[in-house]
Amino acid sequence: MTTARLPAALAPWAATLSALTPELATALGPLLRRLDALVGDREPVADRLGEPDGLGGLARSGRPDQLLPTEWLLADAYPDEFLRRFVDGELLHFAPELRTPTARGRIVALVDAGPRQAGAGRLVQLAALLVLHRRAAARGTELVVGVLGDPAGRWLPGDLAELLPAWLAARRRADATPEDVRTAEEALDADDRAWLLTSPRPAGQLPARAHMLASEPSRWSAAGATHVTVQLAGTVAELPLPAAEIAVRALRGAEFRRAAAAAVVGLPAETGGGARPAFTTTARTLLARGRRATTLLAVNLPSGDGSHADPVRARRHELPGPVVAAGRTGRRLIALYAAGDRLVPYVSGRPFSGRGGEPGGFTADLAAFGVDRALSTELLTRPVLPLLRGGDDLLLPLAGRWWRITPDGTVTDDGAVGRGTGAPSHFDRFREPRLYGGHLPPEAVDARHLVHSGATVGWSEDGRTWELRTASGARERISFRENADVVGLVHHGTVPALVTCTRSGRLVRAVRPDGVRTLSRFSGGTTPPAVHPTLPLIAAETRPGRIVVGDAQTGRIHHLIGSDE
């Protein structure tokens, strides 16, 4: 949601309120601001922990003394533009770096979905979730929501656009009990901070606590409740509710902006997006999409000493149809493209031998993969899928399954892709267990999150605290507090490091057991960077048509790739 459709007082809330319609966001404004003031003393927006270690890049929030000098020049020359950027959150600040950040727990909202919280109570819960979400994002952590009475450890999923409808649908026939609260709190991690959202009666049965918000209607009109009384840690305040008409629409979910589903249309001739670099095999070959869906760009990266950035040129391959998958094996670059209702191979380099080299070799029907020509456009706006060799066959991860394509075009199901690889329209190679060269530790087999590089493997249950086992058998633990995704695993000597990318801002960091390095030169792209599966290489499209490749440990740029294709 842009600030143009919000009152000035709600402009700083634009990102959080984007999950609501502008009408509901405006109507919730008075309740939201008053509740934010109550919560503020108990849930600070930012209390960065850790030992300072200089500057770690750029951010769009911070103190006035952290503003870039160019922003102060802008304020002097164009004060109106400076104010607009301030309101829209576009001013750039120096971001402080922390040498050893303290592990930060989540903000957990435990909501009472019983009958006493129906109506007005749910509106207060909605405002509280928005307040807590904004503060969690500012602190670099995440908000998770649990419904009291559900099995321990069951959390509502996703970002606000996905979370709010799930929260609204969670209704219980009975109010929460003290036993429900104890069960939910036993499932929390040590660093988590829990907020209890309930009504005064259940709250009165529990020991006093600083993070318990109880609400009930206090004033009424002919149309319904107009005000609520809110109790928080001994403070009692009367807060206004939205008008009845829009409040009813909100409680029916009609004022939520749901996340758009992937459109399914015919394969387009133009991608209209960025290059989306990818390392699909262990070769030093970077693959990227061109402006057209039928263009594949391939860059063979030289193994220089990294003392200076070398410009390299991408070789352009024009295919008869949209590129679906590609990979370099030995002296061959092999790709699969869609032609009508078939997947057809393209080979650059040494031709196939035997039946694979005959006309029509490795050509397969799309229907054999469980898909048809109406592929999701999301598939073609993602990096190209890996294409690997398995003996004489080709191996392709598509639509959540591995497929084996024989030289005569026969397609057989080779099993499901690994958990968390990004299926069906995307595939993260570094999360696929079958591509790990060794035996997984027993703890990693059923872990929710997996990452591997060479002989090192890491696993995690929450995506924040990771256990790693290196090639020598040594164990390491790495944790981080940011709302970020792990996009790769690299090594500096024998020391492993997780490469993370924040979900907002695309800030890229190398997180080691003994500290963190911000990779500013690879940050800020429209998509997460690509990390090589075995080498400490990282590639990012920092602006359209411009790819930088460098060291994922030091942040030094090795190669610059610029293409108008």
Image (cartoon, rainbow, N blue to C red):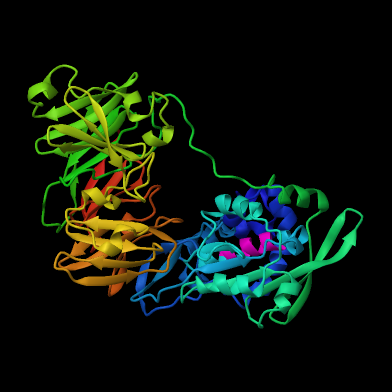
Residue 369 seen anywhere in this rendered image of the structure: yes
Q: Which span is picked out in magenta? A: 124-134
177 to the left or right of 152: right
- Estimate the x, y position of residue 302 in percent, counting from the top left: 12, 47
- Estimate the x, y position of residue 439 in percent, counting from the top left: 19, 57
**Residue 247 against residue 339 in the figure, above or below:** below
Asked whether 161 or 411 is in front, the reply is 411
Say which quarter of the image contains residue 39. bottom right
Residue in the picture at 78% in, 56% down:
242
86 to the left or right of 275: right
Total numbered labels: 0
**Residue 336 against residue 500 in the figure, above or below:** above
Asked whether 113 or 34 is in front, the reply is 113
Q: Quadrant of the C terminus?
A: top left
Q: Residue furthest right?
A: 222
Q: Main secondary structure of the magenta part?
A: helix
Residue in the picture at 21% in, 53% down:
436
**Residue 411 against residue 398 in the figure, above or below:** above
Residue in the picture at 48% in, 37% down:
262
Magenta stretch containing residue 132, yes or no? yes
Residue in the picture at 26% in, 63% down:
442
Asked whether 453 or 549 is in front, the reply is 453
- Estimate the x, y position of residue 45 in percent, counting from the top left: 56, 71
